[in-house]
Image (cartoon, rainbow, N blue to C red):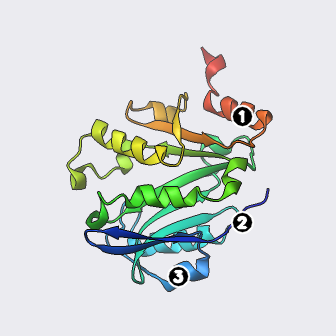
């Protein structure tokens, strides 16, 4: 597959200041920026910064960031699904996962997440891919936002819909373990029928067990 890494950038005016939304970035560029200490949703900030630098340099890896001056305050990642997850069991070059999205509390409610996703979908190459995201409630900052599980899920669905991702049913045990969890996906216009069929097989791998 061809993995386009055409650079895009835009300014976002917020009540807390002006942000630069840009990407995809190289690992070298990622390492040149500071990483905000409030980006703690997935692992300690220093470790997450290191992980994003490594993802950025993968052939399929794409990282878009929101930065305040030289400090990263939000990001979204795209890469192949984790080898331990079912979404990698059928090796598909045209299936990419929106693996993580995070914005510091200061800029939540300013449409930073939506703008990250919108910019990341601008390149025409997205039409060659199935882009998935798996939403798990245990990654959500319910305490920090004051939202309940269902209101937070509505926020996530609305944000993902900006990039054309919609809900898809699945029998994946981890997603099925709680009704708030969900699979969302965007199927590009040039994705061949055989890839869509493989994606359907991945979604319902347990169908013959019942």
Residue linked to disc 1: 196
> Where's residue 55, x and y in %?
60, 67
The residue most toward the left is: 146
Q: Residue 59 carries which label?
A: 2
Determine whether 114 is above or below 174 in the image.
below
Give percent across and percent down for residue 71.
40, 80
Give left or right: position of 18 versus 187: left
Q: Residues within 10 Å of mark 2 (few under 14, many from 20)?
A: some
Dividing the picture into quarters, in which one does residue 193 lie?
top right
Image marks 2 and 1: residues in contact by CB distance under 8 Å: no
Looking at marks 2 and 3 on the same chain, the residue that comes earlier in the sequence is marked by 3
Measured as percent of width and height from the top left, residue 171 is found at 55, 27
- Looking at the image, residue 179 sits to the left or right of residue 82; the answer is left
Viewer-nearest residue: 154 or 175: 154
- Label 3: which secondary element: helix
Which residue is found at the position 47% from the left and 73% from the top?
Answer: 49
Labels 2 and 1: the sequence-earlier one: 2
- In the image, residue 1 above or below residue 153: below
In this figure, what is the number of numbered marks? 3
Residue on which the image places disc 3: 31
* Residue 50 location (% of width, % of height): 51, 74
Decide which of 78, 207 is in the foreground and name it.
78
Q: Residues within 10 Å of mark 1 (few under 14, many from 20)?
A: some
**Dot 3 alpha-carbon crowd within 10 angstroms: few under 14, some 14 to 19, many 20 or more:** some
Name the residue at 35% across, 39% down.
154
């Amino acid at each position: 597959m061809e993995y386009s890494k055409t650079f895009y950038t835009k300014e976002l005016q917020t009540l807390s200041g002006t942000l630069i939304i840009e990407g995809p970035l190289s690992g070298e560029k990622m390492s040149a920026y500071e990483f905000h200490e409030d980006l703690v949703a997935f692992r300690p900030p220093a470790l997450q910064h290191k992980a994003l630098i490594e993802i950025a340099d993968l052939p399929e890896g794409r990282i878009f960031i929101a930065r305040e001056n030289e400090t990263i305050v939000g990001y979204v990642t795209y890469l192949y699904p984790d080898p331990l997850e079912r979404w990698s069991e059928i090796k598909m070059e045209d299936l990419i996962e929106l693996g993580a999205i995070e914005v510091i509390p200061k800029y939540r409610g300013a449409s930073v997440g939506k703008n990250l996703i919108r910019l990341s979908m601008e390149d025409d190459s997205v039409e060659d891919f199935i882009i998935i995201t798996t939403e798990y409630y245990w990654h959500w900052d319910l305490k920090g936002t004051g939202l309940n599980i269902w209101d937070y899920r509505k926020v996530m669905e609305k944000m993902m819909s900006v990039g054309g991702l919609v809900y898809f049913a699945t029998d994946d045990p981890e997603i099925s373990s709680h009704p708030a969890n969900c699979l969302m996906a965007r199927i590009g216009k040039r994705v061949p029928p055989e890839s869509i069929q493989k994606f359907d097989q991945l979604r319902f791998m347990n169908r013959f067990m019942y």
